[in-house]
Image (spheres, grey):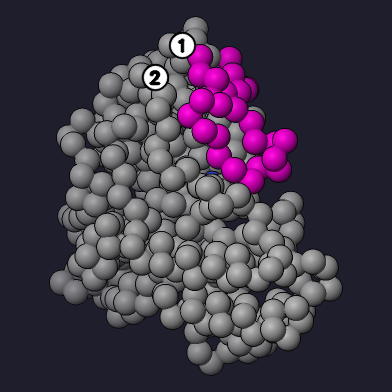
Amino acid sequence: MKHKQRVYNFSAGPAALPLSVLQEAQRNLLCLPGAGMSVLEMSHRSSWFEGILHAAEANLRKLYQLPDRYHVLFLQGGASLQFSMLAMNFLRAGDTAADYVVTGAWAQKALKEAQREGAVHVAWDGKPDHYSRVPTASELKLTPGAAYVHITSNETIQGVQFEKTPDTSGAPLICDMSSDFLSRPIDAQRYGMIYAGAQKNAGGSGVTIVILQDELLNKAPEGLPSMLDYRLQAEHKSLYNTPSTFAVYLVMLVTRWLLEEVGGLEHMARINDQKAHLLYEAIDCSESFYRGHARPDSRSTMNVTWRLAEEALEKEFLKGAQARGLYELKGHRSVGGMRASIYNAMTLEGVQALRDFMDEFRKRHG
Ligand code: PMP
């Protein structure tokens, strides 16, 4: 189908971006005011690009209130490379195991890569419940003195999310925050490291943001390949080689939008809660016409996942949704059904349109 207008895009990532960010990028594509050239044409060593990189970092520091002892890095290779890189830096050379909390598909992948690098202990695995929930504090079987504890704060495929940061009994907490990065305030100082691919909540694809505590960084061994060495990346302030310049520019625009237009993370979180509530309410009031995948206490505010009674009905739902300009609602093949990804840039209006369609579809077919 051809579209003249923008649709409501519920894609899990790359995902919808704020309209004002796209408009600014469009306005400045040929010529960044003052610079006389496009960001796409600009040397990463130019003072213009350094200004963009510094602004992106400063915005992130402000949003998460990061103290100086945290480094902010802009790396490539996606969150998937971080699965390996963090284990190379903090597990390979040590003699203590790392704890992994396996809440879904992404945590499984992180675990698999770490297993290649050293001793790994599964502190909890949600498989018996089909990855429909996160663990309670008492269920976590942590190793005393663990090299680190790895969690996935939001499982993009299953749609389960930690509401609170789990306690790690003093071990550094490393978090894959790819799909709920910048969606709510966090106490960043409870984390040894946070990493996130930018293409859901922070910009386009091509850059991965790593926030890393200095104490943890200093535990990295010598002799790692340069590109996979956090210490070297931090020393060179993400400019050891050519970074994904346009992707960093988008992160700068999106973080500025969060600060200046949205008004910060508290406000963003309130809007995100409101959006998620609209969809979960439609599920809960549907008398099992819609069946949520995640248990209510572990529901994600970013990826809402649900099924219908029959696959034929699911196909019908997707078709009807598309006809109303509601796109990318098909769930991941491993879970099936629907998934509405409602990251920061998805508007309340877009979610309301989906909610209206869900109610209407149920009345017609329920
Ligand atoms: N972790 C999570 C939670 C994700 O959602 C994704 C991507 N969907 C990844 C890791 C992998 O990210 P990338 O494609 O940037 O490697």
- The residue lying at 48 percent from left, 29 percent from top is 137
The boundaries of the magenta stretch are 115-144
Q: In which quarter of the image is residue 262?
A: bottom left
Residue density around tag 2, few if under 14, some if 14–19, many if 20 or more, within 10 Å: few
Q: Quadrant of residue 59?
A: bottom left
> Three-letter amino acid code at disc 2?
Ser
Residue 254 spot, x, y in % from top left: 32, 63
Helix, strand or loop at mark 1? loop
Is residue 21 placed above or below 7 in the rendered structure?
Answer: above
Marks 1/2: CA–CA distance: 8 Å
Residue at label 2? Answer: 169
> On the rendered image, what quadrant is the N terminus found in?
bottom right
Residue 115 spot, x, y in % from top left: 62, 22
- The residue lying at 15 percent from left, 72 percent from top is 34
Residue 183 spot, x, y in % from top left: 37, 56
Residue at label 1? Answer: 144
Instruction: Using the rendered image of the protein, determine whether residue 302 is visible from the camera's viewpoint.
Output: yes
Q: Do callouts 1 and 2 mark residues in contact (Cβ within 8 Å)? A: yes
Along the viewing direction, whichever of 53 and 332 lies nearer the viewer: 332
> Three-letter amino acid code at disc 1?
Pro
Indicate yes or no whether the magenta region holds residue 129.
Answer: yes
**Left or right, 324 with reference to 235:** right
State the mark number for residue 197. none
Helix, strand or loop at mark 2? loop
Along the viewing direction, whichever of 323 and 134 lies nearer the viewer: 134
